Image (cartoon, rainbow, N blue to C red):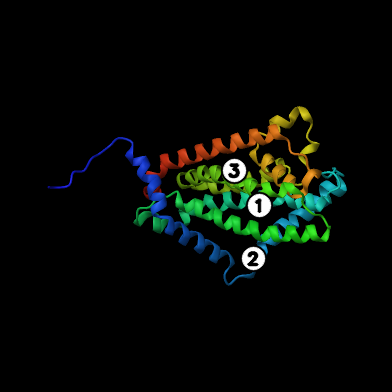
Amino acid sequence: MSDVIVIEPGRQELNYWRDLWRYRELFYVLAWRDVAVRYKQTVIGAAWAIIRPFLTMVVFTVIFGRIAKLPSDGSVPYPLMVFAGMLPWTFFSTALSDASGSLIGNANLISKIYFPRLIVPTATVVVAFVDFLVSFVILVGMMAWYRFLPGWNIVFLPLFVVFAAIASIGPALWVTALNVKYRDFRYVVPFIVQLGLYVSPVGFSSNVVPDQWRLLYSLNPMVAVIDGFRWCLLGGQSVLFLPGVAIGAAIAAFFLWFGIRRFRRTEASFADLI
């Protein structure tokens, strides 16, 4: 008896997500390759993950802490507060920047074989996470220098790391899809990252924002992520604005859905456009 092929409506989408699991080894290979390129046989690769947030912390401490004399969170040293905010922001900006050009950088691979293209930009997030871990070691050293110990809030830090990853992946997928179709969009990404650095509470505490503007300010999901990191690492010194966290989580979830949706809608044309 010959085999019968049954075609069912709606199976294509289900098979796509199954293929993501089937091609998980390709995800590991691409992620490891990107990490190796960043760190292997180079000094600046590993040093850049330390120099960039550290120098930004110094600049923000001088401008906002010394010149503008903005308050810190409680008795937390201003450099420590800034660096705690730099961790998730650097994670977000690195993931967005690296993912935006990932498909074009893998043009030969995409044009020759089939695999879920979603693997390529999400693999670059691993590099951003490795940079995050390197910078986190510096934060631990700073906390030891200032003799500042985290409280019980630290147990929620993995939850906010996931929050930061979700907030990064959604916009990264959307920008990646746009960059394939509109090549000049790669010049817009650095501007977006630079603008976001100053409108997010990286160099200052979000507590300086007037109460009547807190909910509107929380429409930026990175506000909730940064506040969450500071609350976890700095304990009760940093107050967590729960309505803002809820709004930020909802916005991040929406952008994750929207980013995947836009990416999937344009994925079939990637090989032709590249």
- Residue type at the position of mark 2: Ala
Residue sitting at x 57%, y 58%: 127
Which structural element holds mark 3? helix
- List x then y, in percent, for residue 24: 43, 55
Farthest residue, direction top: 212
Q: Which residue is drawn at 48% across and 41% down?
A: 260
> Are the residues tagged 1 and 3 within 8 Å (C-beta)?
no
**Where residue 90 is drawn, which disc sits there?**
1
Q: How crowded is mark 2: few (under 14 residues within 10 Å), some or many (20 or more)?
A: some
Q: Dot 1: what SS?
A: helix
The disc label shown at residue 46, or none: 2
Q: In which quarter of the image is residue 70?
A: top right
Viewer-closest of 113 and 185? 113
State the residue lying farthest toward the front: 152
* Chain-order first, disc 1 or disc 2: 2
The residue singled out by tag 3 in the image is: 167
Q: What element carries label 2?
A: helix
